[in-house]
Image: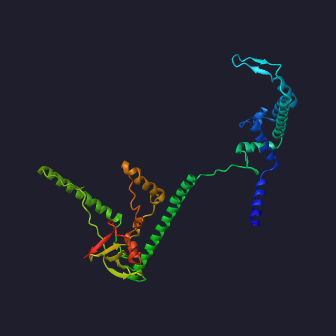
Amino acid sequence: MRFLNVIAACLLAGAATAWQPEDHEIFRIRDDVIAHEGPDTTFYSLIGVTRKSTMDEINRAYRKVAARAHPDKARQSFIANYGKVTDPATGKTTVDKKKRPSQREIDAFHKEADARFKRLSIIATILRGENRDRYDFFLDHGFPAWRGTGYYYARYRPGAGTVLIGLFIVVGGGAHYLALYMGWKQQRQFAQKYILNARKMAWGNGMVVPGLDTAEVVPSAAQSNGAESAMNRRQKRMQDKELKKNAKKGIVAEDISEPIEATLVSGPQGNKRRVVAENGKVLIVDSVGNVFLEETSEEGETNEFLIDINEIHPPTIKDTVLFRFPVFLWNKTGGRFIGGSVDVPYLNDDEKIEHDINPAIKNATASSANGEARRRNNAKVRRRP
């Protein structure tokens, strides 16, 4: 407890010595000017000059103001003008000589006039000396306020709503995206390592996979340019002749731009070897280097899932809570009645949050049946009877 008191005393001492004595004098005089002259009154406006005024202009203006604000002259003016009454209807001013201020009122006014004259003297000293730069600095950057133990600047204190919104943006946006990105990077590295280990177990340390080291020799453009151009011209002439013959016979030419469904090739290609991974999963490595996960369904069908790291898509801002949570709230509230709901897949399914990860990779890397992911309809699979 004593140690904490010492630390608090040191902190308060440091805060108290943050301002110079000249600064404290400027702050005190400014507070008095605001209290008696108004919040918009500055040292320059009180004397009747501007910030660009020279020293001679400040001296002349101060002499005029000081002559009017002298306590003795101000006292006489107060007594003389005490009985003046202005008619609101006509605007004329009359003097009631019988109406005189009491001695108590005169003493109070004299005391106030004396304090005002002293303030003017101190302000003139500040504006005519080196402290003018200090006052101009605080005039540009703001004045600290008295906080009971010293002058301190008022700091912005955000409310609970602002803090929650800021945390939601930082954590739900930046931190969540960073976590998703690190997970995506680790998934790719792990899948790549998993594929390399499978190839190594299948084809040995030499990594000589049949079919990968041989490549078809493609003729260069310079060698085939002449033959291709001649063949294209000959085919074009023959095609024109056929079109003319068909036009004479009334035969409509077949639309050659009609799309033809391509035949997709899936499953192991060429030579293949079956290996068992460390977690007990059965893998098939073909001659092209593709790695497939072999699984048997409950119906007895054998499925082969391609392990492809290119299907592990990088995360986007739409995958973070910053986007998904507002969309979830909209779909549950306004979107249900308006009909403009936004589709965010797998928002409530913990097993499908990472929906971009290849299901074959998740199945292959699972150590038990409880860790296996669900199969998807878009997975690259080949069934064998």
State left or right for residue 18 relative to residue 76: left
**Quadrant of residue 204 in the image?**
bottom left
User: Which one is in front, 291 or 91?
Assistant: 91
368 over 253 or under it: above or below: below
Q: Position of residue 254 (x, y in %)?
A: 19, 55
Q: Position of residue 343 (x, y in %)?
A: 38, 56
The front one of 17 and 202 is: 17
Q: Residue at x 43, y 54 (%)?
A: 329
Q: Is residue 70 visible?
A: no
Q: Is residue 365 above or below residue 1?
A: below
**The C terminus is located in which quarter?**
bottom left
Q: Quadrant of the N terminus?
A: bottom right
Left or right position of 55 against 242:
right
Find residue 178 and report its horizontal and vertical position in percent: 51, 63
Q: Is residue 125 above or below residue 147?
A: above
The residue furthest right is 72
Judge by depth and name the residue closer to the eye, 380 or 1: 1
Name the residue rendered at 77%, 44% in the picture: 27
